Amino acid sequence: MLTELRKVTRGWIAMAVIGLLALAFAIWGINDVFKPIQSNTVASGRGVEVTQEEFNTAFDTEIERARTQAKRAVTRQEAVEANLHMRLLDRLVTQRVFDRLARRVNVSASDAMVAKDIQETEAFRNPVTGAFDAATYASMLAQNRITRSFYEADLRNDMARRQLANALVAGIRPPSSFGRMAIAFETEKRTISIAAVTPERIGAPPAPTDAEIEAFYKAQSAGFALPEYRAFTVITAEPADFAARVEVSEDKIVELFQFRKAQLVTPEKRSFILLSGAKDRAVAEQAGRRLGAGEAPQAVAGALNLQVLEFSQKAKTEAPDSRIGDAVFATPAGQVTAPVQGVTWSIARVTGIVAGATPTLEDVRAGLRAELAQEEAQTLMNDAVEKFDDIRAGGAALEDAAAQSGLTVSKIPLIDARGLSAAGQPESSILDRPELVQAAFAAGEGDPTDWTSTDQGGSYLIRIDIVRPSGPPPLAQVRDRVAYAWRMQKIGEGMRKIAEDIRTAVAGGAKFIDAARAQRVAMVTTSQTLDRRMAGQGGPSPQLMGAVFSGRQGDVVTGAGGPGGAVLFIAQIESIERADPASDPQMLEQARQSLGSMLADDTLATVQAVAKRDARIRLNQPLIDRLVGKATEEGAEK
């Protein structure tokens, strides 16, 4: 079946036919077959819905916000690669879930509350009087392509969510004891002295006897277990392998050029400055006269209470309004358009024109030839795969079928799931093909896998030839490793014995520095004071720092560190200091409020998680993928 699909869908003409079929489906619909795909909902659940239009609008807004923050052009493709679309969808779902919860507990925002919020929004005020201005409100919504009903419904939901969130956390007030504990933890300082025992202090232990090696291996065999190893055969089919056989005729190049000509045209683009928000035509005409006289747009806008927007190299379809686009593209460079009526009146000055371009055949010949060559190579590859499958169906061996059909055979020696040989070296033949290793360790032994597609338009299949199960190897195979591990254990025991002797001496009344010297152990530092921030940087040993801030005053603690953890650090906790919360009531209250904020955040996160689970959210991933794919292509074109 896969082979037949390859045969009937190859070629740009076939793809054009498929495109026409898809358009027909979109126009007339095939409900029974494609109903799930035609859904206009990207996420849904019990009482929860995020539509395609909502997702697209919010995605555009997020990209604009990203561009503002980055202070550069951010393409839709970059946004998709950063997973912005899925984070946005999660946020939209969370909002809808909270909307549902608010409805269930009868929390809502009244018309008066919505009106008050709108009237108090700074962006909707007249810059001269400072009062709410209905015309400014309408203009701002129009500039952002938002209807009044949509904005006010969204605002109402947002206010209800805030009311609900505030109600959920209003009663959270941690006791003062929490603040005292937080202050004690954050302000704690410890003074310590540190000594270090190195392997050289212990010296090399005697060589182990055969009996000691055998006993150690028996007790520690799990630590010497080898991973599973697999050897396998890979049959690969890549278009690049067939490129040398391809010949592209001039007729095909011309035919494709004629088919693509309309798509190859680069549209004219214009840069312009738009002044919008004029209450009537007279104001717009006045702005136009002042712009035409050379007055700065910002000065004109300030004098006439207008908004200024700058557009750089935009196609006609990218203008904020089709009427503005018509006016701008009918006006010569450096000139001012006639007034344009929308929700308010606007005027624009054209600041630059980039002419469109229609490429000739010679301009695009190389690219079209490469595309057709790739397509023909794909066809040859598909034919080879089909031939391979037919020969295999006749009972031929995998290698024979590959040789007769011109496919590549690769023999991969025993490797583990990381792609390493038994010697621990990367297998060079698959160094840049981690997907082959993953597929090999997911496959069963014996029969070859099905064909798997690659990112380059090719395919591969795998046959597992040898499986060497994981487990401890024979002692003879790892005897040197066992002997080395035995010696390291003996050195470690000697180091820990020294640390225990120092601990015992200190417990008996000796000074830490004297006990260390008695054991011929070098001091690293004496009476050094650390806070948790300094300890978090690791010091000589992160393990030691953890023990220092877990122990009690006077304790002697240890921690491994240094290269390979081969050094044993020993420290005594000489003193512990903490700030007195009673001496600073303001600090105590700040700590309590900080904990209260964290508890409130945790509470809201828990409520959101439970509400999401109860709503049983389902994502329409095919629709999401199509929307994102379309957005990515548009972003690439821009």
Image (spheres, rainbow, N blue to C red):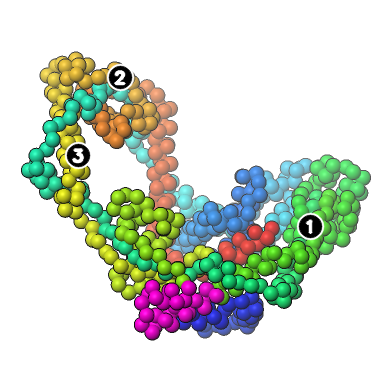
Secondary structure type for disc 3: helix
Name the residue that disc number 2 marks: 525
* Residue 101 in the image, given as x and y percentages of width and height: 45, 60
Q: Is residue 85 left or right of residue 315?
A: left
Q: Is residue 106 left or right of residue 347?
A: left
Tell whether position 146 is magenta. Answer: no
Which marked residue is nearer to the observer: mark 2 or mark 3?
3
Identity, as a three-letter code, of the amino acid under mark 1 = Lys
Q: Main secondary structure of the magenta part?
A: helix
Name the residue that disc number 1 marks: 269
Name the residue that disc number 3 marks: 484
**Splitting the image into 4 quarters, where does residue 213 fall?**
top left
Judge the density around disc 1: few (<14), some (14-19), many (≥20) Cα neighbours within 10 Å: some
* Residue 176 in the image, given as x and y percentages of width and height: 35, 34
Q: Eyeballing the image, is 171 above or below 230? A: above
510 vs 443, nearest the viewer: 443
* x 43%, y 79%: residue: 389
Q: CA distance from mark 2 to mark 3?
A: 32 Å
* Residue 502 in the image, given as x and y percentages of width and height: 16, 22
Q: CA distance from mark 2 to mark 1?
A: 69 Å
Res 561 label:
none
Tell whether position 402 is magenta. Answer: yes
**Splitting the image into 4 quarters, where does residue 398 fall?**
bottom left
182 vs 176, nearest the viewer: 182
* x 60%, y 49%: residue: 66
Q: CA distance from mark 3 to mark 1?
A: 73 Å
Residues shaded magenta: 380-406
Disc 3 + disc 1, Cβ < 8 Å: no
Identity, as a three-letter code, of the amino acid under mark 2 = Thr
* Residue 620 in the image, given as x and y percentages of width and height: 50, 69
Compare marks 2 and 3 and give the one earlier in the sequence: 3
